[in-house]
Structures are given as structure tokens and as C-alpha cells.
Image (tube, rainbow, N blue to C red):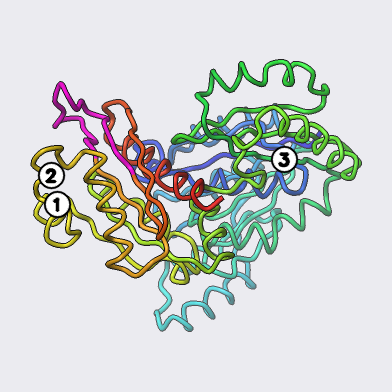
Amino acid sequence: MTTVEIITIGDELLIGQVVDTNSAFIARELNKIGISVFQITSVSDSREHILTALEEASRRASIVLTTGGLGPTKDDITKAVFAEYTNDQLIFHPETLRNIETMMAARGVAMNSLNIQQAEVPSRCTVIPNSCGTAPGMWFEKDGVVYISMPGVPFEMKTMMHDEVLPRLQQRFRTADILHRTLLVTGFSESALALRIEDWEDQLPQDVKLAYLPGSGIIRLRLSASGADRQSLVAQTEKEIKKLRAILGNHIISENDESIEEIVARMLTERRQTVATAESCTGGNIACLLTSISGSSAYFKGSVVAYANEIKEKILQVNVSDLQQYGAVSEQAVTQMAANVRQLMGTDYGIAASGIAGPTGGTPEKPVGTIWIAVASSSQTEAKLLRFGNNRESNIQRTSTAALNLLREMMV
């Protein structure tokens, strides 16, 4: 099987200043054409570190893809290191220089010596055009291993992958089909789900692998299979999913690797219905998830982030005596928030959340992680008490997911 190692280059990755999203993108795209990623490595802008990483990767993979270190500044040393690794030297590449000149002219920026140096490439590499930037990609071959160097700027790398790298890899390598099916499951902890489907999992065919991908209140079950005949893989995987449906029933909320916000967006769009949110402890995060989907203006009207009690009273018309008697973190408060924001915004549904996200603010009666959510329609209002831990970020994410799932349940 053709295997790949990805090497991301840059000090900024190792100090946490920049999050490596490139590797995830590259791995997903390679998987689509039947190429597996064996390892992902991050290294500093160091000649010795890069050379060592390339040498070690050559013993593990038949394709090594690198991103980063191709810019015009002194800390960008990837080209020079590749030239050394392949016993080559840098030369000017006229076509690349013309591309850089054209791009700089279109931007209205004068060329300088550093821009010109970006047209230098190792003499024996195959230059990969960069239609979005000035740093060309490079294709090397050494001792049967293919090395591909791409820019670290994500939109430049993504365009180069789609337009140049993937087609070249498909032409160069014979690949098997890799099929993934991912189901979203609610209502279980990871361990409880594992126990529920243990017998089914133990009887899976040898070439079908199962992975648990737990998230904020939702577990993704991924079935993976590889082989030469895609039609057989599809049939085999569907056979196993059919068995899983019989075991889990309505606990499976999607079979298409959707996020909960994508599921809700699709359902609202299909029904031509709308929603608004009234949020306290989530601080607008539910609205953020809903509006993260393109076309959300069709179903999302607006939000009231009512952090203070006076906003709950004045804007959302929550009964003052209920706030005094039961508190803002109560069934009474969230049901009124959900119903009243629905009326305020003129929507089909209203979602509300109020709780103690933490890590401070808890009481013996209502410890940190105590959260109420509610969803209201024209005919009913449902509320739910959640009890989480003391991690603020986790509590906000889990609450948002639970609130959207409560809306989904009401729409089913």
C-alpha cells in the first residue's frame, strides 16, 4: 500500500503560535484517492531538524509531503535544505520568475531582491506552479521515495494540492479504494456505547475497522474499509451499518458525518422553518454554530445574549418573581427565555440556555456544570437539566451541542 508521511515545518507550530490545519486537510484529501497517511511530524526551522526528519521519513513512507519554509525571509530554509538532501544546487527558474513578476504587478507591488530569490529552485526538481502565491512547490525523487514540498500558507497549499499534487500522485501511483462511513450517535458515553455494540464489533469482518471519535455529547463511529473493488466495499459496509441500526435505533442521528449544526440546518431548510436563540452561559455560541453554515440566513433570525438578569427581565420578559424564587439557572427561566425569544424574533423555534459554566460561580445547590436548556415551538416547550464538570470551554461546547440536539429531537 502507498503510504505517506507529512512533515510540517516552522517554529510557529512548535510554540503553539499557529495551529497545524494543513496536515488534517492533506490527510483527508489523500484518503479520498486511496492513499494512507502513516505519520505526521512537525519540525522547527532548523537545517539539522529538517534533514533528520526527511531521512527518517524515507524509511517509513513512499511519499513525503512537506509544508512550510518556502517564504522569502531568512528563516525559510526548506529549499536550501532539500537541495542539500538531494545533492543539488539552487538555480533560477525563468518560468517561476515570470509568474512572480506577473503576480506582483497585478498586486501593484514592486519586485525586490527577496521576491526574485523565490524563483530559485533545486536544479533537478520538478517545479509545481503556485497559482495563489510567489513560492513554487517542488517535486523530488530520491531512492524510490517521492518528496513534495508545498507552501505553508493554507490557501496556497490547498489550491496546489487540488490543482497539481493530487492529479500527479494519482498518475504516478496505483492506489486502492479507501471507504469511510461515519455515523453520529447520541445518548451514550463512549464506554457505554462500546458495551452496547461489543458483540457486533467483535464480529466485524477483518478488513472493516471501527474507530470511536467522541465529541461534545456526540460520538462519531467511523467504519473504514479498503480494497480494489469499491462496489464491494460499499455493500459490505452498508451490511454492517444495517446491523448497527437494529442495535442503536434512534440513537443514530446521522450516517453522513455531519455536525449537529449541519443536521439542524438541513432540517430547518427542508421544512422552511426558522429559529432564534436566547443564551446566557453559552454567550452566543449556539448562534455561532447555527450561523457557521452557509445559507443560515434562511433559517436563523437572531439571538439575545442575556447574561445579566436585567436583560432576561427587560428584553426576554422573564418573570421577575421566578428569577427571584428559582434563579436564572432554572427550568422556569429557560422555558420563558425560549418561548419569549421565539415570539420576539417571530420564529418557529426558540432555543435557550442558562447555567454555571465555571470554573467559579457554583453553589452547593447548583454546582459548576449545572445547566438548563430549553426549546420552544408554537405548540410545546421542552426543557432539560444537564450536569457537566468544571471545564468552562467544554461546558459551553457540550451545552451548545445538547441544545441543538434537543431542537433536532423536537423536529423529528
Q: Amino acid at mark 2?
A: Leu
Q: Image check: 113 left or right of 194? A: left
Please give the name of the residue rendered at 65% of the width and 57% of the height, measured from the top-left corner.
161
- Residue position for label 3: 180
Pick the front one: 36 or 406: 406
In this picture, which residue range is highlighted in magenta? Answer: 355-373
User: Local crowd at mark 1 within 10 Å, few (<14), some, or many (≥20)?
Assistant: some
Q: Pointers 2 and 1 in contact (CB under 8 A)?
A: yes
Q: Amino acid at mark 3?
A: His
Please give the name of the residue rendered at 58% of the width and 62% of the height, measured from the top-left corner.
136
Q: Amino acid at mark 1?
A: Asn
Q: Is residue 300 above or below residue 224?
A: below
Give how far across and how far down residue 93 sits, in percent: 63, 66
Describe the element under mark 3 as helix, strand or loop: strand
The earlier-in-sequence mark between 3 and 2 is 3
Q: Magenta stretch: residue 358 in it?
A: yes
Pick the front one: 8 or 118: 8
- Residue position for label 2: 323
